[in-house]
Image (tube, coloured by chain):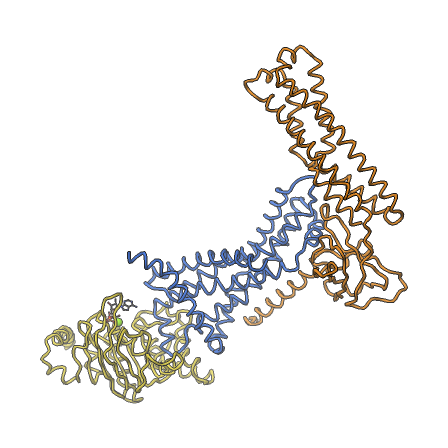
Amino acid sequence: MIRVEHLTKAFNGHPVLQDVSLEIHEGETLAIIGRSGSGKSVLMKHIIGLMKPDSGRVFVDGTDISSISYSELRLVRRQFGVLFQGGALFDSMSAFDNVAFPLHTFTRKSEDDIRRETQKCLDLVHLPHVGAVNPSELSGGMRKRVALARAIALRPRYIIYDEPTSGLDPETSSTINELIKGLARQLEITSIVVTHDMHSVLAIADRVAFIHNARMHWVGSINDLHSSEDEVLHAFVKANEYFIGAAASGAS
Amino acid sequence: MKIPNEVKIGIAVVLAGTVFYLGTRYFRDLPILSRAHTYYTEFVNANGLVAGNVVSINGVNVGSVSDVQLVRAGARVAFSVSEDVVITQGSTAKVGGLSFISSIQLDIVLGPADAPQHAPGDFIPAAEQVDFLGEIAERAPDILSRADTLLKNTRQALNTAETLVSDPTSDLLQTMSSVKASADALHTILLAEQRSIVAVLSDIQALAGAIMTLAQDSLAVTVDGVNVILERMEQNLASLETTTTALSDLLTKINSGQGTLGRLVTEDSLYTELHQTVSALRRILEDFEEDPRQYLRHLKLVEIF
Amino acid sequence: MNGVVLNLVRPFFSLGRFSLLLAKACGSLGDIGIYRKNMVVQMVRIGLESIPIVALAAAFSGAVTTVQTAYQLVSPIIPPKVIGAVVVPSLTMELAAVVTGFILSGRVGARIAAELGTMRVTEQIDALEAMGLNSVGYLIVPRVAAGILMFPVLYVAACLIGVAGSLLAAMLTGVVSIGEFILGAREHYDNFGPYFGLIKAFVFGFLITSISCYMGYYTEGGAEGVGRSTTRAAVMSCVFILVADFALAIVLL
Ligand SMILES: Nc1ncnc2c1ncn2[C@@H]1O[C@H](COP(=O)(O)OP(=O)(O)OP(=O)(O)O)[C@@H](O)[C@H]1O
Ligand SMILES: [Mg+2]
């Protein structure tokens, strides 16, 4: 279980997150939504301790990660898989080596096992043949999927996806959504999905957290989302749903 | 076949280590492959011997000085010599060479060939240091200070002459071009010390050589030889003094108006006199232009032998 | 006013952050597993791949020093062997280390800063950290260690090739015979010289790699930031090589 308490963060005097509290339950899939620049990625970086809060605390399984030592923090981080917004693939390695990297680094598996598992991860993201290619030669969407394969390679307890479907075609998007849903169900992974793709939210999320004006504006289940009277949330969801609806009517 | 990176790095490191080891040994005059033995000696006066100086036996480089340390009774010197060089009992060590002319070195004079061998780490006694030139060194400052003043006066006189000659408002300029040439030449000699240094040095080297050969046989003869040289120096100084005085007189005359332009132009004798004086000066200075203090230093060096 | 104070504090801030980074690097020295493989790669890149350019620079330094020394000392009373006595210590004590340092500030320093800077701005360093890997141990330790270990090797290569260059120049211009050159070098050989050069090489290797790693690791602001870090890494490495060169001469000579 992850708990964020009264987290406040400012960059150069400009507040990005103010008094943000949030709880992520074991095994659920939580979608964090909000406008571009609202601080979703910053919140996600706080959860794995890449950024230190100006005030407030982050608990992972009951430990306050801002007060533990670096080596303890690293142990906590090993339970996470993170898909960064830009993929963050190591461009000194091939796509295959990127996915194999955590396996090489953190497991004592044989070369053969690692190769097999890496291939399996690449198959999962529908990229079975890109192993030998360098990240710089991949398209943006492919890069994101290789990064996703890398994030799940170690079968972590928590996975954080920063905009997993942005920049992907609808078909691949829904494959990724299925994948996230499948992983969550099969492996009982707790997932945090940072996104502004409402389609994705509706497809995979159990609960939704909406960041607006640097604050946690609204948190609730998918069902509450529709019945909510909150105008700002409505506006945000509507803008998206219009798009989803248009896409749906276009398809029919 | 692809060579693994580890192997490449290993080869590079081993090569670098080998080059460093052999290179330093090479420049230290140590045998490149055989080992070196260290010996010790002590001098009352190390005469500027430093680590890195050559160790030589019969003029052959066999090793290098590795350390020179100040001790109560003088200087303790450690030196290493190629292991295949045999140093017999009864060998002695001494500081050789002239540090001004070339590098100084540590000379080992071997003992009898049939004597037992010195073990590595042994103490090799220093050869007795003879102080027969102390007397010269004592006399030298006297002569030198005289030479110093004299040379100063000469320079002054020459400078005056030159100012006079090169003054653009002076009429002398046109008429005394030949005098000026002489004075210029003199000045050049004063400035360009090199040639005379060569002369002086070869003198000293000859002296040192003479003393070296003589030192073995007879002390008295050597001192005599040195005395002759010193007397010659004194004579030189005396004639320099006379000449300078003459020049000064002449210049005083010119300055005070006794030597007017007319007189200079008409009277051949004055011109001739000036010319001769300057030529004489030049001759002496060519012989003796070196800063007199150098003499003292050379004499001290001579003491080494 | 605020700007002035900020500028005054900045060097201390940088020094402090630099020291902390080094402390963190030292702290991860025990974790050999995470940097061993990287270190070999870096040793090849920083060390072996630099040999050609270092050799070129050293050869020319040696040749130029020889010709210039000959030019400046030409005189009937100075024996030509003095050229050897001047050139060899110049190379071993100063030129081999400093010229190598300058060249590698550009070649190695800029490269390290650009690599790490890019990794920082594309979140690759964050990705390493997020996996639970010590990014300092993984990225910085192997580079600095490779610098410290390989610089002395490059220094020895520079000395060897520098002396070879001097001998070649002596031979081609005929200013001094090889025999006399060597004789002079041996007569005035200083035992400490090569060790002094070696110490310099260690220090320069450390300075170039650690400064460049620092600049790259703390890059901010996208591609422009990477460019800034790269330039700064090369410039700062050169500046600190000069400072360290002077400081070592004062402390050790
Ligand atoms: N390292 C940083 N230094 C300074 N400002 C930062 C930093 N990281 C983020 N910010 C600022 O914080 C704000 C929120 O950034 P963040 O990346 O969290 O947005 P986001 O919600 O993820 O947007 P998007 O949906 O476009 O990814 C932005 O205004 C950004 O400029
Ligand atoms: Mg973001």
The percent position of residue C242, horizontal first and vertical second, equals 50, 55
Q: Can residue A167 be seen by looking at this rendering? A: no
Provide residue B64's location: percent of width, then percent of height.
73, 59
Based on the displayed image, in which of its 4 quarters is residue A71 positioned?
A: bottom left
Q: Which chain is painted in blue?
A: C
Where does the image place residue A47, in percent across and percent down from the top left? Answer: 29, 79
Quarter of the figure with the C terminus of chain C:
bottom right
Q: Does residue B13 lie above or below B174 as drawn?
A: below
Q: Where is residue C127, by image quadrant?
A: bottom left
Residue B263: which quarter of the image?
A: top right
**What residue is rendered at 55% in x and 61% in y?**
C201
Q: Is residue A119 above or below residue B13?
A: below
- Residues B155 and B91: in front is B155
The chain painted yellow is A
Q: What colour denotes chain B?
A: orange
The reply to whether residue B261 is visible in this rendering is: yes
Quarter of the image that includes the N terminus of chain C: bottom left
Could you tell me which residue is drawn at 43 percent across and 68 percent down? C19
